[in-house]
Amino acid sequence: MNYQLPEYRFLIVLGAGITGSTVLLASPVWYLNIALLFLVSGVLVLTRNRPDRGFYLVCSGEPLVVACGIMNLWVGLFAVCMLAGIVCGTLGILASRGDLELFALFCGSSFLFALVIQVSNHVLLPLLALGITTAIILAARSVRTYQFRKQCTGA
């Protein structure tokens, strides 16, 4: 049986979404989104055996995300979620049902954050809230990692 890898499923959805939104929104720089989509596709195929494949995908996908975000906030959010799915699929992070639930939680929270930005008409306060939340999460993860290392070393 020929099993399709998860990153290619996300790439197909990304391609369909970018093509559809480019046609529907009639962007004057429509060719840029399509060209950057081909760039991401090429990097996905050409770095098949590279150990740092995720890094290359993030670096090649960010110009696509920025171009889509300039076209429309929601298309940019869609591109971010699909790029995250491609990278997680290549790194093997989306192996279990719990991983898929966490990925869906990421996409849902990103949607809510984008909705707050759309409603507030400016970015400063939501950006500060995101920065503070990220700092709290990173601090909690750092403390947990320290506790885990301390427990494992027997100190």
Image: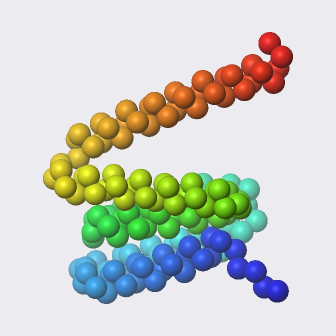
Asked whether, in this view, residue 34 is left or right of residue 48, the answer is: left
Residue with the most extreme left position = 121
Depicted 129 relative to depicted 88: above or below: above
Farthest top residue?
A: 155
Question: Image quadrant of residue 101?
Answer: bottom right
- Estimate the x, y position of residue 72 in percent, counting from the top left: 27, 68
How has the structure been colored for display?
rainbow
What residue is at 37 percent from the left and 85 percent from the top? 20
Task: Say how many tags the image has.
Answer: 0
Q: Residue at x 74, y 24 (%)?
A: 149
Q: Is residue 62 visible?
A: no
Quadrant where the N terminus sits is bottom right
Residue 29 in the image: state x and y as whole percent: 28, 77
Let me know if residue 18 appears in the view: yes
Vertical arrangement, residue 136 with respect to residue 78, above or below: above
**Quadrant of image for the C terminus:** top right
Residue at 28% from the left image edge and 57% from the top image edge = 115
Q: Is 154 above or below relative to 2? A: above
Residue visible at 33% across and 52% down?
113
Residue 122 percent coordinates (x, y):
18, 48
Looking at the picture, does residue 79 appear above or below residue 117? below
Quick check: 108 left or right of 146? left
From the viewer's side, name the closer residue of 50 and 95.
95
